[in-house]
Image (cartoon, grey):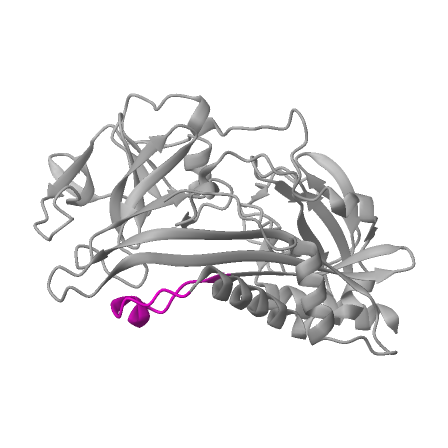
Amino acid sequence: MADHPADLDPDLVQGLTTFLQSQLPARPTDRPALLLVRDLRIVETEQPTNAVTGAGGGTMHRARATLDLYLHAADGYHFVQTSTETVSPVVGLMVLGVAPSHERNISKVLQSCLENFETADWQAAQSRPAQSAAALAQTGHLALGTETTYPILNTPLRPEPGYFPSFLTFRNNQPVAAPALHVSATPRKATGWENLPELIPLLVTAGKEQPLPENWGFSDGSRLYIRYQGHYTELVRQGSYFEFMGPPEGSTWFGTPPPVRYTLDLVAGRATLFADAGRPATLADTARIYVYRTTGAGPATPVFLNNQAVGELAENQVLMLTWTDPAHEPHLRLGTTTLPDLTFLPNFQQSIYVRGVRKPEPGKPLLEIVPTRVGEFDLKAIRLRTRK
């Protein structure tokens, strides 16, 4: 599996613009918008032939795209929505040896992204800060001197075994020490799985074996392991990124067909077949974070981002923050209390909604991340209340 640059005829901007204008002819009542193509990639993966039936095999083509939609107004461009889609061939077609072309996949992934914009909230976009065309032109471009690597790449593994409660603790190389960690390995005999035994990490306490607490992965002191789809598999460092073996998409562990190679996306923490995702964070991208409080929240309270005051919030107020550092996680705090910060992995593909906790609990943050649909509903309700 390898990445290669692709030439689009005549180029992406002209080709996509011509296509959209032909499919969506302008009407007098329309408002101009800008479509920012943040990511457009294709990948080829060689598929093994079924040893029993002889079917399948060949090259599997995939496509991935991320598009940003902006409303063009007199004061600049207002962010509307991000759409990300991945297109893979239907498993049944691969069994028959039919692999859709890159052209078909690119067309399909762009179409899927555009369909997501049908429910765009244009009114909400108008209330967001405007950006200039020059600023948007730099989205995703590498700025000199901004190359960043993560602690897991910069510092050696600790000599004692330990486990990682979350992806962030892995990326920051902060395992929970577990000197009594023991790994049980059961060999597998299925074709292609001989070198991938079933691994069960255990803690030995007072001579008794106990399951490892809920975790993202673990270290035995010399090697790393990731928990993927309920099973553990070794994480192997390849220069500046990590790879691991796992079942093909739509398949189960230790079955057929044989395992495939995945790359760990060090920005988002997900497994991907796109090899580029393993590179260290270098893109100056922007995550949009909406922090708000609803009715009954009380008087205005300061909001801190990484211990820096960034504004204050009373009930039915919204604060829009941006985060441009994919190599580190934001720390949000409401008020100057000694309660812990809200720490999370920033999502650079869609807006993040953080709400003031309605029923605070001892020892927990006063802020919480809510699902997108909940955040959008709350912000609409706030706008309606403030207009009265």
Provide residue 374's location: percent of width, then percent of height. Answer: 61, 67
User: Please, is residue 111 above or below residue 45 in the view?
Assistant: below
**Quadrant of the drawing holding the N terminus:** top left
Q: In terms of depth relative to the viewer, which is nearer, 280 or 121? A: 280
Query: In this view, which residue lies farthest toward the front?
Result: 10
> Does 324 lie within the magenta span?
no
Residue at x 47% of width, y 60% of height: 102
Q: Give me the residue at 65% from left, 53% from top.
A: 11
Q: Total number of numbered labels?
A: 0
Q: Is residue 302 visible?
A: no
- Left or right of residue 260: residue 77: right
**Residue nearest the viewer, comparing 41 with 192:** 41
Looking at the image, residue 48 lies above or below residue 24: above
Front residue of 375/60: it is 60
12 in relation to 23, above or below: above
> Magenta residues, as a range?
86-100
Q: Image check: 87 left or right of 30?
A: left
Q: Is residue 136 left or right of residue 165?
A: right
The image quadrant where one finds the C terminus is bottom right
Q: Position of residue 254 (x, y in %)?
A: 17, 55
Q: Give how far across and how far down residue 130 sits, in percent.
A: 83, 53
Residue at far right of view: 74
Would residue 252 be visible to someone looking at this image? Answer: yes
Q: Nearer the viewer, residue 245 or 331?
A: 245
In percent of width and height, residue 237 lies at: 35, 31
Please give left or right for residue 333 compared with residue 240 in the image: right
